[in-house]
Image (cartoon, rainbow, N blue to C red):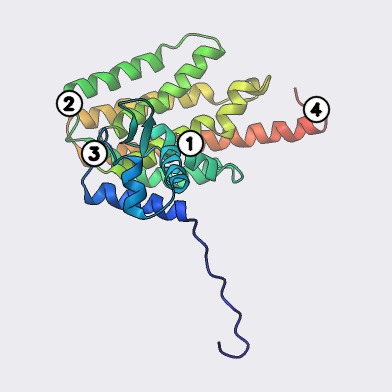
Amino acid sequence: MPEGALPTRRRFTKRSDQVVEEIKRLIMRSSLQPGDRLPQERALIDLFGVSKGTVREALKGLEVEGLITVTTGPQGGARVAKVPLETAIRLLDGYFFYEPLSVDDLYALRRMVEPEMAALVAPLLTDEDLAALEANLAFCQHGHPGPESERAVRYAELDFHDLLAERCPNPLLRFACRFLNTMIKKGYVFSQMLDEPGARDRIDNVEQMAADGHGAHRAIIDALRARDPDGARSAMAAHMDQAHAHLKRMEATLKEGFLDNSRGQFT
């Protein structure tokens, strides 16, 4: 070691974690698909030269990740599974648990992915897809008064984007759009506006946001119906700018109210 150099610490990897990676490689090499069986526990022990406890710990880790399901009984064992979207989002949500995402954080990425996603799906949507978008638009336009109805409408406005994302051929774009929409639903603005007593009354741009959103979704559908990728991209980009401005204003209003409340002045 050169004089004055700091010793490097060797990274220790648990044997069960190594087996997890080896089983993943086995799945890929064997072209196993969701529903296919993994080798039995005894075969995995012999294949990797490890103990029963190590194999079981590795299988448990894969099950937590959502990559396999494990059942008991005569027909039981480990089967390959496709990681559910909800599981992937929950794990990533946990990563950001101590780093709350602001409106600016979310829209910095949403501005990039949503317009491209809209352009990609424009030539791919079926008549049934377009009908689902029209139904979503009608639901959002004709919501009923009351907090639960407002919650349903606000969530449905984001579901509009999920309907598009489900048809996106790029899996990374599809996941990014779905993740961002989930984070907006769970984020500071929605949770405060919909759940904090008195907060909704302080916000003065909900109706305008809804009207602007309806107009934007109408323009997006029209471009999609015309199979116009450039038009869909442009309409979605304008929508992202508008939605960002509205949520940014809401965020500022709610945080101002929070500060006032900390001084006993929240009304």
Q: Which residue is rendered at x = 36% and y = 41% of the image?
A: 41
Q: Are marks 4 and 1 in contact (CB under 8 Å)?
A: no
Identify the mark at residue 33; answer none if there is no mark: 3
* Residue 243 seen in the figure: yes
**Mark 2 belongs to which amino acid?**
Thr
The residue to which callout 2 is attached is 126
Q: Quadrant of the N terminus?
A: bottom right
Camera-nearest residue between 78 and 245: 78
Rendered residue at 41%/53% (across/down) = 50
Query: For the residue carrying disc 1, how many other residues have a C-alpha within 10 Å: few (<14), some (14-19), or many (20+)?
Result: few
Q: Who comes first in sequence, dot 1 or dot 2?
A: 1
The kind of residue on which mark 3 rests is Gln
Q: Earlier in the sequence, mark 1 or mark 3?
A: 3
State which quadrant residue 213 falls in: top left
Residue 116 at x, y = what percent?
A: 29, 44
Q: Quadrant of residue 241?
A: top left
Circle 1 or circle 2, nearest the eye: 1
Q: 129 above or below 78?
A: above
As helix, strand or loop, the secondary structure at mark 2 comes to loop
Circle 1: residue type: Arg
Quick one: label 2 or label 4, which is nearer the N terminus? 2
Q: Position of residue 139 (x, y in %)?
A: 38, 14
Mark 3, secondary structure of its residue? loop
For numbered disc 4, what is the local secondary structure? loop
Q: Which mark is residue 265?
A: 4
- Tell which circle, 4 or 3, labels the residue nearer the N-terminal end: 3
